[in-house]
Image (tube, helix red, strand yellow):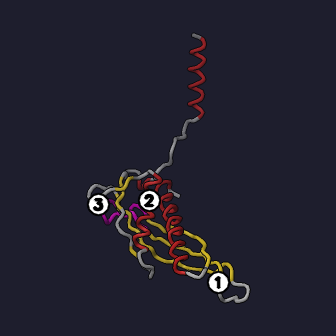
Amino acid sequence: MVLRLFALFCGVIFLKSCAGYQLGGKKPEALAHVQKIYVPLATNSTQVPRAAALTTNGVVDAIVQDGTYRIGRLEDSDAVLEIELYQITYGAIRTVRENRLRPEELSMTIQLNWKVTDGANPLKVLDSGTSVGRTTLFADANLQTAQQSAINDAILRASNSLVARLADGF
């Protein structure tokens, strides 16, 4: 009997020490009611072909991996996430030793502008912002292939940043 009371007392003390904490993240206040998000095809303001599809797939994959929201159709979603691939910039990190004008390693920065609107009222903006993804690539003999491989990585980094903002508020 005494052992049961002691175990109950220890359990109550253990649970009391965790007061105020919860498992998992806390959604931002504006998105607290959102369970399903519809993600239409992203718009592409750059000259990179197929970048809109890559951006949409990257964001959908990041949402599914995070698990805070579910992907839905337009008809049954609580919110719509509109994404624009706004800008891709390159910068030289290292140059060839013999020729300082020819880069050997490049940095790529991708900027996504996004907006979450209410599913019932598309004029009501719930949240908006900008997410940035950065990566590096080597300027080898086939620069186009290197850029195409690097753009996937940069889009995934920007997508993870976007979903962290939607799921946790930062």
Camera-side residue of 4 and 90? 90
Dot 1 amino acid type: Pro
Please tell me whether mark 3 or mark 2 is closer to you in this view: 2
N-terminal-most mark, 1 or 3: 3
Tell me the distance, in whole angstroms, between the alpha carbons under discs 3 and 2. Answer: 18 Å
| Contact, mark 2 vs mark 1 (Cβ under 8 Å) | no
Q: Residue furthest right?
A: 97
Tell me the distance, in whole angstroms, between the alpha carbons under discs 1 and 3. Answer: 45 Å
| Contact, mark 1 vs mark 3 (Cβ under 8 Å) | no
| Residue in the picture at 44% in, 51% down | 68
Instruction: Determine crowd level at label 2: few under 14, some 14-19, many 20+ residues with C-alpha closer than 10 A.
Output: some
Q: Position of residue 146 (x, y in %)?
A: 55, 76
Taking the image as shown, residue 148 lies to the left or right of residue 121, namely: right
Q: Which residues are magenta?
A: 114-127
Q: Which quarter of the figure is the N terminus placed in?
A: top right
Any mark on residue 61, and which?
2
User: What residue did someone put label 1 on?
Assistant: 103
N-terminal-most mark, 3 or 2: 2
Q: Residue furthest left?
A: 75
> Picture quarter containing residue 118?
bottom left
Q: Is residue 57 above or below residue 66?
A: below
User: What residue did someone put label 3 on?
Assistant: 74
Q: Position of residue 30 (x, y in %)?
A: 42, 56
| Residue in the picture at 36% in, 63% down | 39
Q: The residue tagged with tag 3: helix, strand or loop?
A: loop
Q: Position of residue 102 (x, y in %)?
A: 65, 87
Instruction: Determine crowd level at label 1: few under 14, some 14-19, many 20+ residues with C-alpha closer than 10 A.
Output: some
> Picture quarter containing residue 125?
bottom left
